[in-house]
Amino acid sequence: MSGIFLTFEGLDGSGKTTQLRLLADALAAQGFDVVTTREPGGTVLGKRIRALVLEIEDAPAPLAELLLFAADRAQHLETLIRPALAEGKIVISDRYADATAAYQGAGRGFPAEKIRQTIGLATGGFKPDLTLFFDLPTETALARANSRPEELNRLDKETIDFFDRVRLAYLEIADAEPERFRVVDARGSIDEIHQRALQIVAQFLESGNRK
């Protein structure tokens, strides 16, 4: 049986990483074989790319940033995601190609066609079975992120207008691909949000609606 590819998206501060861990634990408790990963940084090469893109003061040029994320994704897909799916596992990734459309497309202002070409080159058109976007007002997400200064990276220092564009791009993807891309209200307690996410994923698994 082929596996299932789930991705979590959201602004930093949306709680997506915490929710990913909770969902992975819940699925594992039900007997599923679950692999969790992230972009950038899900592979050995990816960890080095993450340091180059997010953790240095000498920021890469916007085009270099775009291409570094694409390189990370190509390596991630071929060496981790596809092999795990071939083994019938559920793979849950903290970000994937939608992040490039939102951050480098809407955020940085790259033309939509260039973004499509870059994503296509890295992924060959391979998309998740299901994507959850943890949505919060921009100001709320940034306040949460800034309350954890030890976890901030270079992208977190962008302007609120930048993150407004990113959030809007995610919501536009949700409108364009409602079968794949679901919006989760990220307001409320951690458990309330977890229950919302778990319900969406449980319904998806029950439906058998997968590649």
Image (spheres, rainbow, N blue to C red):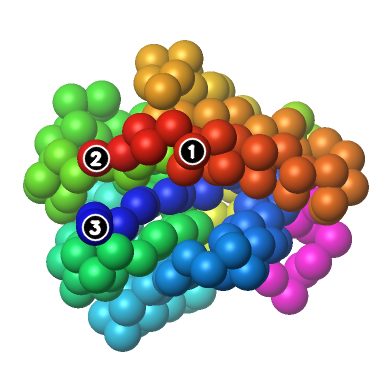
Q: Amino acid at mark 1?
A: Glu
State the image coordinates of residue 77 (x, y, percent, origin top left): 22, 62
Q: CA distance from mark 2 to mark 1?
A: 14 Å
State the image coordinates of residue 53 (x, y, percent, origin top left): 39, 66
Residue lying at 83% horizontally and 52% vertically, measured from the top left: 190
Residue picked out by circle 2: 211
Residue lying at 17% horizontally and 49% vertically, measured from the top left: 123
Q: Nearer the viewer, residue 127 or 54?
A: 127
Residue sitting farthest toward the right? 189
State the image coordinates of residue 11 (x, y, percent, origin top left): 61, 44
* Location of residue 57 with respect to 59 vertically, above or below: below
SS class, disc 3: loop
The disc at residue 1 is: 3
Residue lying at 24% horizontally and 57% vertically, measured from the top left: 1
Local packing at callout 1 (Cα closer than 10 Å; few below 14, some 14-19, many 20+) is few
Q: Earlier in the sequence, mark 2 or mark 1?
A: 1
Disc number lying in front (2 or 1): 1
Q: Is residue 18 found left or right of 24 in the rendered image?
A: right
Residue picked out by circle 1: 206
Main structural element of the magenta stretch: helix, strand or loop? Answer: helix
Magenta stretch, residue numbers: 143-151
Q: CA distance from mark 1 to mark 3?
A: 15 Å
Is residue 76 among what the camera can see?
no
